[in-house]
Amino acid sequence: MSVSPKKQEQYISEQVESGDFQNASEVVRDALRLHEFYRHCIIQDLNKPENIFWSPNKFFKLWL
């Protein structure tokens, strides 16, 4: 996996400079909250009955 700290630092700086956040910690906390919410929504969607398909060998969950 390739991670670019420079791009992340630039993005965080831009967010702080925009005035939407007071500091870098606020940007990171907000990003983590959004990521947690996103994952929760995806998992909920995957667990909906209409997204579970039966196969003779196993269940398949499809991301629709």
Image (cartoon, grey):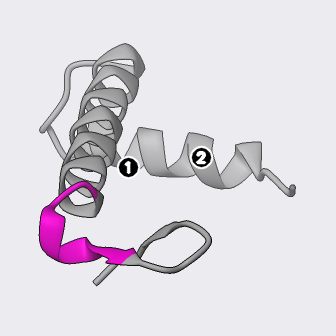
Name the N-terminal-most of marks 1 and 2: 2
Q: Which one is in front, 50 or 28?
A: 50
- Cα–Cα gap, marks 1 and 2: 10 Å
- Using residue 3 as the reference point, say whether residue 28 is left or right of it: left
Other-residue count near label 2 (Cα within 10 Å), few / some / many at <14 / 14–19 / ≥20: few
Measured along the vertical axis of the image, is residue 29 above or below residue 9? above
At x 31% / y 33%, what residue is drawn? 36
Secondary structure category for the residue under label 1: helix
Q: Is residue 49 magenta?
A: yes
Instruction: Specify the farthest residue to the right.
Output: 1
- Using residue 6 as the reference point, say whether residue 59 is left or right of it: left
Quadrant, the C terminus: bottom left
Q: Mark 2 points at which residue?
A: 8
Instruction: Specify the farthest residue to the front.
Output: 56
| Residue 10 image position (x, y, % from top left) | 55, 49
At x 44% / y 40%, what residue is drawn? 13
Q: Which amino acid does the dot numbered 1 rest on?
A: Glu
Q: Image quadrant of residue 21?
A: top left
Q: Which amino acid does the dot numbered 2 rest on?
A: Gln
Measured along the vertical axis of the image, is residue 32 above or below residue 50? above
| Residue 51 image position (x, y, % from top left) | 25, 74
Q: Is residue 7 magenta?
A: no
Q: Name the residue under label 1.
A: 14
Q: Image quadrant of residue 24?
A: top left
Q: Nearer the viewer, mark 1 or mark 2?
A: 2
Secondary structure category for the residue under label 2: helix
Q: Which segment is the magenta one?
A: 47-53
| Residue 61 image position (x, y, % from top left) | 41, 69
At x 59% / y 46%, what residue is drawn? 8
Q: Which one is in front, 30 or 25?
A: 30
| Residue 26 image position (x, y, % from top left) | 28, 19
Q: Which one is in front, 19 or 39?
A: 39
